[in-house]
Image (cartoon, rainbow, N blue to C red):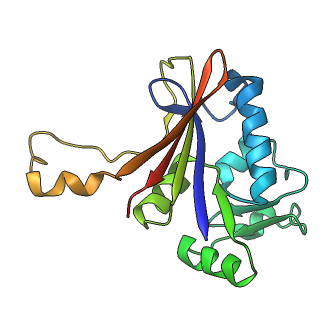
Amino acid sequence: MNVTLILLQTLNGIISLGPKDRLDWGGKADKSHFRNRTLEVGTMIMGSNTFKAMGMKSLPNRKTIVMTSTPSDYSSYQSEQLTFTSTSPIALLEELQNQGVGEVVVAGGANIYRTFLEAKLIDYVEVSIASKIAYGGIPAIKLDDVNFETDNNENNVEQNLVDLKFVKTEMLDENTILIRYKVLK
């Protein structure tokens, strides 16, 4: 199964400006890319905060799986195209593969990105970079706090990296570039 992480970020790596951010700052070209890729793939996985930011609705013609610690909180939203789960990422992907799903998109947010990356479940990363710099917000990957005075063990530095191989770039519009990488495992 191919697992592609798709994200929109500012130049300085911010994916959301806050809880009410609808990502309109990304522009029409990025929204079109996201729509086309998720329609092409057919199944996407996101966290509950991303689901809330998208207006708490499923997108048409694709299956949306929302990862949450409290699936019962969303029982009124459940449908054939929209499911909620507290299953681990590994178990979820195994279940989808057993259902015949060959590819999924991981669509956010920061905690979901990190969880899938740390479990080494991501095969590709597609980053849309908008020509914006944010003064605050949520970074693409939730980072650990590093104390440079006590956390200077050089043996641990490399474990905090995911190796990527550049695949291609594409200009989505005059202000947004898409970069696609393959994750080296």
Q: Evaluate whether residue 138 shows in this view.
A: yes
Measuring from the top left, give residue 118's x and y in whole percent: 40, 62
The C terminus lies in quadrant: bottom left
72 vs 150, left or right, is: right
Farthest front residue? 168
Q: Which residue is nearer to you in this view: 123 or 70?
A: 123
| Residue at 68% in and 54% down | 48
| Residue at 17% in and 56% down | 156
| Residue at 81% in and 48% down | 56
Measuring from the top left, give residue 46's x and y in whole percent: 66, 55
Q: Evaluate whether residue 16 shows in this view.
A: no
Q: How many marks?
A: 0
**In the rendered view, would you say 145 is above or below 79?**
above
**In the rendered view, would you say 174 is above or below 1?**
above
The N terminus lies in quadrant: bottom right
Residue 147 quadrant = top left
**In the rendered view, would you say 182 is above or below 54?**
below
